[in-house]
Amino acid sequence: MNAIQANSCGTGKLQAVPSASLVALLFLVCLLLSPVRLSAQAAPSAYERHINLWAGAEFSNFQPDYTPVSRLDGLGAYVDWSLNSNLAVEGEMRFLHFNTNWGESQDHYLIGPKFATQRWLKFKPYAKFLVGVGKMTFPFNLGYGKYFAMAPGGGVDYELSRRFAVRADYEYQIWPAAPAIPGQTNNGMTPNGFSVGFAYHILHK
């Protein structure tokens, strides 16, 4: 019980990692991607051909990794901005508020690089590594907390047409400072699950 209460003061602050550290991590992601943009300046026409912006919605089913038998359902949204044919920046929000047990829920706010392989027919497999914030509302009104989260994952996009695509996605999140069940060793939490989505092609050059 104490492990939860220590991270459930209800202040809305990121308990595990200071907000300045989170900003620094997001800045690092942008910095790592900057060489791609700089190299593209030498060949602007080649770069512009690969400017793609997709926006989508998804349905997710996740194991929250607090109560071991529960799975949460929810809705989310994502945006992909492609820097070239293989590298993109992805941002996502997810709200797991359905099929809850005893009031348990999670929210995810993540951003990071996404690496895609060459398209095979209309399939485009990808891997991604996102970072951001995971919010947990604990069961039985024990409290809530916001924690730094890392989210390696992958999946495949399938283009239905030039304007529409669907995807299947898997994420394995790591919340290193999230509390364990009272009485157990605090090894953090690892929410993980599947999502299916539908996206619209907003911008293409």
Image (cartoon, helix red, strand yellow):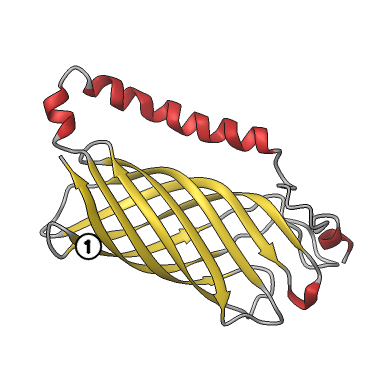
Identity of the residue drawn at 85% across and 55% down: 6
Q: Residue furthest front?
A: 202
Quarter of the image that includes the N terminus: bottom right
Judge left or right: residue 185 versus residue 134: right
Identity of the residue drawn at 55% across and 70% down: 96
- Asked where in the image residue 102 lies, by quadrant, the reply is bottom right
Image location of residue 44, percent across then percent down: 16, 23
Judge by depth and name the residue closer to the eye, 86 or 81: 81
Instruction: Give SS at disc 1.
Output: strand
Judge left or right: residue 127 versus residue 103: left
Q: Name above or below for residue 110 compared with residue 3.
A: above
- Asked where in the image residue 69 lies, by quadrant, the reply is bottom right
Image location of residue 23, percent across then percent down: 59, 34
Identity of the residue drawn at 61% across and 38% down: 22
Q: Name above or below for residue 172 compared with residue 1.
A: above
Q: Which residue is mark 1?
A: 165
Judge left or right: residue 53 versus residue 186: left
Q: Residue furthest right?
A: 2
Image location of residue 172, percent across then percent down: 51, 58
Q: Given the image, on which type of amino acid does mark 1 rest?
A: Ala
Image location of residue 159, percent across then percent down: 17, 61
Q: Name above or below for residue 44 compared with residue 3.
A: above
User: Dot 1, crowdedness within 10 Å: few (<14), some or many (≥20)?
Assistant: many
Judge left or right: residue 112 versus residue 49: right
Identity of the residue drawn at 65% across and 75% down: 68
